Image (cartoon, grey):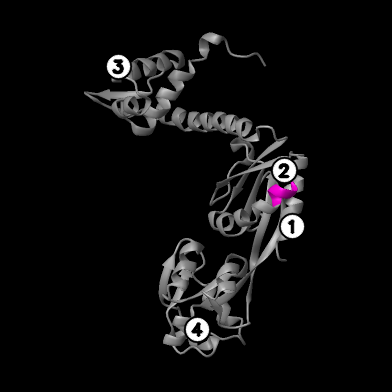
């Protein structure tokens, strides 16, 4: 396939200016961000429109708004510019090291499990630089140039290789203050106590109680949060009892900030996976995956 003529390739400055103007839908704010004049922004956008041959903005008085073509182009361009930035960051972060890896990870797993253990990996693998970005949902690994993703859920990510990392075990915990205040002597008493819930797992507590001799309980009241970090903080602050993955609360259990209400645990039917692009063969990624498997509690 022949490369497009150079005359069809706009300047990087024009692309960057359009991306900023599209993000704000304002030439004034783009000018402020890029330290340009408003007329310079308008000129760069006009250059881009001349190359593409379509209007990217509708101009109404002093205001501008993206056209449908402009909106589509802005979405695709944002991905392309991000990839350029990531390529540069990969080269810079690698420095004198042989490999720089981009890893996508759920924020709580990254903050509470992976990052505290990374110094061990750095010490044993000084030639590999691990860079972490957070992602909450599935995405195109190849398009975003990630080498590895750590994903929780089902084995249903198209065009990837998914290797199981670990299953999830939930433990009922609370603070000592909470246990004393609500006179909790057995896990069954938690049914009538304030409970903390994850928004993405509203039935977890019911599943837990059902796993105890098929106990059936009504819908349980309590506070809902969208991150495990907030549920953990709420439990430590005695807002309620929480059902939490054991690997996320190791420090709190060790220092007594949280205590287990029962030895009975709930093994969920979903698990963590190490996800790589289906056509990837990267020895550095394989070494990281081997280390992850060796350090996680199965």
Q: Main secondary structure of the magenta part?
A: helix
Q: Nearer the viewer, residue 289 or 116?
A: 116
Please state which of the two labelled residues, at mark 4 or mark 3, is closer to the viewer: 3
Q: Is residue 52 above or below residue 164?
A: above
In magenta, the rendered stretch is 121-126
Q: Which residue is mark 2?
A: 126
Q: Label for residue 293?
A: 1
Which label's residue is closer to the chain start, 1 or 2? Answer: 2
The residue under the point 71% across, 49% down is 123
Quadrant of the rendered structure where residue 214 is?
bottom right
Q: Which residue is mark 3?
A: 39
Which label's residue is closer to the chain start, 4 or 1? Answer: 4
Q: Which residue is mark 4?
A: 217
Asked if the residues shown at circle 1 and circle 2 are in contact, with their CB atoms under 8 angstroms apart, the answer is no
Residue 296 percent coordinates (x, y): 70, 61
Q: Mark 4, residues whose alpha carbon is within 10 Å: few (<14), some, or many (≥20)?
A: few
The answer to whether residue 123 is magenta is yes
Quarter placement of the N terminus: top right
Q: Is residue 219 above or below residue 10?
A: below
Label 1 sits on a secondary structure element that is helix
Image label count: 4
C-alpha separation, residue under disc 3 versus residue under disc 2: 49 Å
Please state which of the two labelled residues, at mark 4 or mark 2, is closer to the viewer: 2
Label 2 sits on a secondary structure element that is loop
Q: Nearer the viewer, residue 286 or 219?
A: 286
Q: Nearer the viewer, residue 126 or 151?
A: 126
């Amino acid at each position: 396939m022949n490369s497009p003529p150079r005359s069809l390739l706009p300047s990087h400055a024009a692309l960057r200016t359009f991306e900023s103007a599209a993000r704000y839908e304002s030439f004034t704010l783009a000018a402020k961000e890029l330290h340009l004049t408003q007329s310079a922004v308008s000129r760069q956008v006009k250059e881009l429109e001349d190359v593409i041959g379509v209007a990217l903005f509708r101009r109404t008085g002093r205001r501008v708004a993206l056209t449908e073509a402009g909106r589509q182009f802005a979405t695709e361009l944002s991905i392309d510019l991000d990839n350029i930035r990531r390529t540069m960051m990969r080269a810079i972060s690698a420095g004198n090291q042989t490999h720089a890896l981009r890893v996508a990870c759920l924020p709580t797993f990254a903050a509470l499990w992976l990052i505290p253990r990374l110094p061990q990996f750095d010490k044993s693998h000084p030639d590999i630089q691990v860079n972490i970005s957070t992602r909450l949902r599935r995405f195109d690994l190849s398009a975003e140039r990630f080498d590895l993703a750590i994903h929780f859920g089902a084995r249903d990510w198209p065009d990837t290789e998914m290797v199981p990392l670990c299953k999830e075990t939930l433990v009922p915990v609370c603070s000592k203050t909470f246990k004393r205040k609500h006179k909790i002597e057995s896990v069954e008493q938690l049914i009538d106590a304030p409970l903390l819930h994850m928004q993405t797992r509203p039935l977890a507590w019911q599943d837990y109680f059902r796993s105890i001799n098929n106990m059936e309980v009504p819908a349980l009241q309590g506070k809902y949060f969208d991150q495990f970090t907030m549920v953990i903080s709420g439990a430590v602050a005695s807002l309620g009892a929480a059902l939490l993955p054991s690997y996320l609360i190791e420090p709190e259990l060790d220092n007594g900030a949280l205590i287990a209400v029962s030895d009975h645990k709930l093994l969920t039917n979903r698990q963590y996976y190490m996800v790589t692009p289906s056509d990837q063969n990267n020895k550095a990624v394989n070494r990281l995956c081997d280390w992850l498997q060796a350090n996680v509690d199965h």
